Image: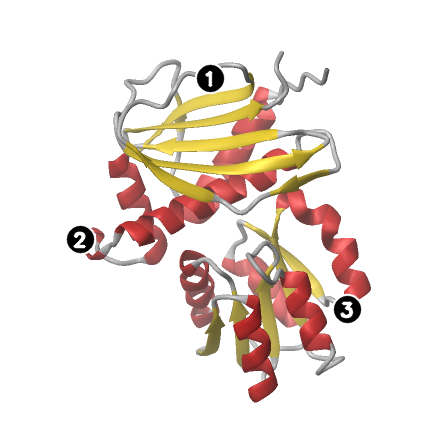
Amino acid sequence: MISTSIVDEQFWELIETIWSTMLNLPVLRARALAHESSGPAASVRLHGAFRGVVQFLPSERFARRATARMLDVPEDSLTSADVDDAMGELCNMLGGGVKSLVPGPTGLSLPSVSRRSRPAPSVQRRQVAAELRFTCEGEPLEVRVLNDQVA
Amino acid sequence: MRVLLVDDSGTMRTIIRRSLRALGVDDVVEASDGLQAIELFAASEFDLVLTDWNMPEKTGLDVLLGIRSLNKTIPVIMITTEGEKDRVLDAIKAGVSDYLIKPFTGATLAQKLQRFALPV
């Protein structure tokens, strides 16, 4: 049974690079965050030597603010499709980075985005390979890497 | 310079188009999927193709193969994530000219374009 723990610092470095390049915004690690009850839930699946999912759970406020910044448009001009696409793309980059940190060969799915109306479900029957909570401009963000193979 | 930009993400097309504009490249034709990309390429002249790798239906590799069946020499740059770098060998065998790993900066994009003597 494969147990993969992604090195915390490598994971954090990945997040910092993506946020710096795509948004030119700093991120701060957080030990605990108040869970947002709604917002986009973006994910990409990893398949192959490592089977699991990368989840990106931003607050709604961050999602809209970041999308406006990426598209260089006013926030009030955004559609939900714009926000979902932008968050999916951030998750895609996170997934690509994670893929380079897990055993290979491992493939990457296309990102998918859904809307959550309650706090993200607790991860049961899955091993958490990595989990980082952080803030960006005061907004809570969470990224998880879940291993399908039960610990 | 006329660029064909292929990406299923509208966000990425916007960002890349903005980076190209900052480099003085304004003539950019966008395709949101691989099939549209090949059709556009067959119908018009381009100086460069930038294509995402991971797309539904037709991947960037499919786009590359389709373009190479029509033109052996046009620069085709594959856009991929860090983790997909290992698949670049497949793209090299299919005739890709170079690759860009996202996220990438405007400076990196400029370096890639200049490598093919494209004025930026």
* Distance between the alpha carbons at the discs numbered 2 and 1: 34 Å
Q: Position of residue B110 (x, y in %)?
A: 57, 65
Question: As shown in the figure, which amino acid type bears the numbered disc 3?
Answer: Gly
Q: Which chain carries label 2?
A: A
Return the mark for residue A76.
2
Residue identified by numbered label 1: A123
Q: Numbered disc 3: what chain? A: B
Q: Is residue B39 in view from this perspective?
A: yes
Q: Residue furthest bottom?
A: B44
Label 3, label 2: how many angstroms apart (C-alpha)?
Answer: 43 Å
What's the mark number on residue A143? none
Which residue: 62% across, 64% down?
B111
Q: Do tags 3 and 1 sit on the same chain? A: no
Inspect this view and state whether residue B25 appears: no
Q: In this rendered view, identify the residue nearer to me: A59 or A24.
A: A59
- Which residue is rendered at x = 53% and y = 47% of the image? A110
**What residue is disc 3 on?**
B95
Q: Position of residue A73 (x, y in %)?
A: 26, 58
Q: Quadrant of the N terminus of chain B?
A: bottom right
Secondary structure of residue under mark 1: loop
Front disc: 2 or 1? 1
Q: Do the residues labelled 3 and 2 touch (CB within 8 Å)?
A: no
Q: In which quarter of the image is the C terminus of chain B?
A: bottom right
